Image: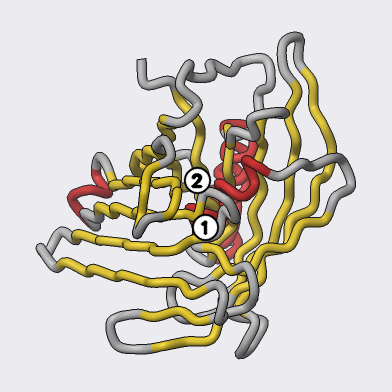
Amino acid sequence: MKLKFKILIPLAVLVIAAVSYSRFLLFDRNNLNLPQNINNLHYQAYWWIIPVGEAVLTVSENQLYNGEDAVLIEAEAETKGIFETIFGIKTKMNSVVDAETMLPILFREVTYRVDEKKEDKIINYDQENNKLTTKDAICRILPSTHDPLSAIMFLRNKDIKEGDNIEINLNSNRSNYKVGIDVMNKIKNREREFFHLKGLSERRQGEKARHRVEFSLYITEGEHIPVLIRAFTPLGPIAFKLVNPD
């Protein structure tokens, strides 16, 4: 009996955690407070139902980059609370996107860790010749390859409808990924409409059982603002909920 009781305790904890997570991070279409500035989005990050960090996504107006019109997309994320003491990670990302094709020209990611270790990654994209260049390598990429930030911008500018299947080529770490997204359905409240999307990101080469993440997101109809993003990782579910900074 004692052995069965010991087994039942962790199972009960897992069930309670799963139910709490699903209820806590359900998409609540009637309780949304969208920001006035859709190009400056603030998110609260959760691991299961535990707040673990914050993230900000900013899109700047068109500017010149090497003589061409470009859009600058910036993101900043950092751990908070007890996770800041344990892990202490802060990441800044920048993506320079061609204003006409909406494909990335340059992607930079700088990560600061609690042990003061700094990682700085810079990637240059040659979309015409399907090449990616880092500090120490040149890699082949597929046509119309995105980085994580330009992929978000791609979704924001793409016309979508229920039943659509979207495929995005992704590479920001010298590995080519396929991101498949299904537009499941449209959800309405009294003021707005939202799309529910489900997706799978997986590495194209190597064992398919590895390097794959399932995710879902809810975006507003029209501007396609992500209001809830959920990713199901080997370490457990992670979610980003849009919050109003005010």
Q: Secondary structure at mark 2?
A: loop
State whether residue 182 is above or below residue 213. Answer: above
Identify the residue at image location x=60%, y=62%.
4
User: Disc 2 marks which residue?
Assistant: 48
Identify the residue at image location x=21%, y=54%.
88
Q: How is the image coloured?
A: secondary structure
Identify the residue at image location x=48%, y=16%.
36
Real-space CA distance between mark 2 and mark 1, rounded to the nearest whole angstrom:
7 Å
Please report contact status of discs 2 and 1: CB closer than 8 Å, yes or no: yes
Residue furthest to the front in view is 67
Estimate the x, y position of residue 67 in percent, counting from the top left: 37, 55
Estimate the x, y position of residue 161 in percent, counting from the top left: 84, 40
Estimate the x, y position of residue 242 in percent, counting from the top left: 50, 30
Most foreground residue, 113 or 7: 113
Horizontal arrangement in the rendering, residue 116 relative to residue 29 (left or right): left
In primary-sequence order, the first of circles 2 and 1 is 2
Instruction: Determine the image quadrant of residue 87.
Output: bottom left
Q: Secondary structure at mark 1?
A: strand
Horizontal arrangement in the rendering, residue 216 relative to residue 56 (left or right): right
Q: From the image, which quarter does the C terminus lie in?
A: top left
Q: From the image, which quarter does the N terminus lie in?
A: bottom right
Dot 2 alpha-carbon crowd within 10 angstroms: few under 14, some 14 to 19, many 20 or more = many
User: Disc 1 marks which residue?
Assistant: 236
Most foreground residue, 67 or 201: 67
Most foreground residue, 48 or 120: 120
Estimate the x, y position of residue 89 in percent, counting from the top left: 25, 55
Identify the residue at image location x=43%, y=20%.
244
Q: Amino acid at mark 1?
A: Gly
State whether residue 137 is above or below residue 43. Answer: below
Dot 1 alpha-carbon crowd within 10 angstroms: few under 14, some 14 to 19, many 20 or more = few
Q: Amino acid at mark 2?
A: Trp
